[in-house]
Amino acid sequence: MTINRAHALRLGVNIDHVATIRNARGGGFPDPVRAAKLAEGAGADGITAHLREDRRHISDGDLDRLMDELVVPLNLEIAATDEMLEIALRHKPHAACLVPEKREERTTEGGLDAIGGHNHLKPYVDELTAAGIRVSLFIEPDPAQLDAAVALGAPVVELHTGAYCDARQVERRDHLARIVAAADHAERVGLECHAGHGLTFDTVTPVAAIPSIVELNIGHFLVGEAIFGGLESAIKRMRALMDQARAETGGAKSA
C-alpha cells in the first residue's frame, strides 16, 4: 500500500499518561519526553500534551523539555485561564488546543461550549493567535458549536470522539454519523478538522476514513498498549490502520 504522505491523515500522539504512571510513584520514570521522542521515530506527526491546572500528569518541567527537544510540532492542550495563557505565550508551541477542565474529572468529559463561552474564550483565542500560535477548540460534533468556533476566530476544531468510542455497537453508527456531518460542516465553513478522545485499534478506522478530518490525536490507548507490546509497535499499528482507512477512501484532502 502506497500513501502520499503530503496528503496523509496526521497522527498526534498524546504522552500525558506516561507522566501519569511516573507521577503515581514519583521520581523520573517513565519519562514522557523519552516517550515523545520515541513517538517521533515511530511515525507520529506531532505530540500532544495537556498541562492541567492541578498538574496531575504533564509538569512545567516536562513542557520545558518538550519545547527544547521535539522536532515535530507540539500541540499544547490548556484550559482557558490566565495562568495557562501566560505559559502558552511564554513557550509558543506550534498549537494550543483550548479544552474544558474540571478538577474532579478523571479525564476530559466533553467539548467546550463555544456558544455560551464566547465572551470568555474570545480574548484567549485572540491573544494566542496574535502570538502566532495555531488555536484549536475541543468541541462536540455539533454544527452550532462549529459555527461558534468560526465566530471566535479559531482556525481549527478537534471533534470529541468519546461518545462514539464509548457507545455500544448498535448505537455507535449514530455517533459516527454525527462526526461525519460535523466534519463535513467544518469543511464548508472553512475550519480545519481534527478528532480525538478514546480512539482504539477497534474504533479508529471509521473516523480515519472521513476525508475532511486531517488529524487524529490519540494517547491513553497507545500508552496502555505499550505495556503489552511496546509504544513503538502500538504507534506503528495505529499509523497503519489510519493509512489503510484513508487509502481505501481515495486519500486525504490537503490540510
Image (cartoon, rainbow, N blue to C red):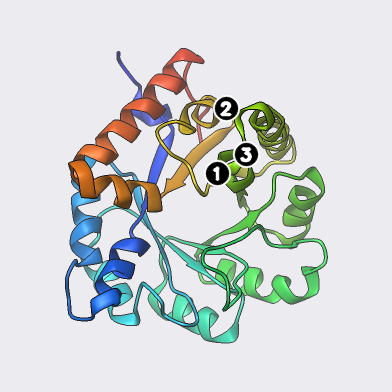
Q: Which residue is drawn at 78% across and 57% down?
A: 151
Q: Which mark, residue 32? A: none
Disc 2 and disc 1 in contact, CB within 8 angstroms: yes
Q: Residue at x 62, y 39 (%)?
A: 167
CA gap, disc 3 and disc 1: 16 Å
Please name the residue that numbered disc 2 is placed on.
210
Please name the residue that numbered disc 1 is placed on.
195
Kind of residue at badge 3:
Ala
- 186, 208: nearer the viewer: 208
Secondary structure of residue under mark 1: strand
Q: From the viewer's perspective, is residue 221 above or below residue 8?
A: below
Pick whichever of labels 3 and 1 is earlier in the sequence: 3
Q: Residue at x 43, y 38 (%)?
A: 200
Q: Which of marks 3 and 2 is in front?
A: 3
**Residue 37, percent across and down?**
20, 55
In the image, 195: left or right of 1? Answer: right
Kind of residue at badge 2:
Ile
In the image, 88: left or right of 59? Answer: right
Disc 3 and disc 1 in contact, CB within 8 angstroms: no
Q: Can residue 219 be seen in this view?
A: no
Q: Is residue 144 visible?
A: yes
Q: Quadrant of the N terminus?
A: top left
Q: Residue at x 70, y 71 (%)?
A: 121
Please name the residue that numbered disc 3 is placed on.
167
In the image, 11: left or right of 119? Answer: left
Structural crowding at the residue carrying mark 2, measured as other residues with C-alpha within 10 Å and reported as few (<14), some (14–19) or many (≥20)? many
Image quadrant of residue 225?
A: top left
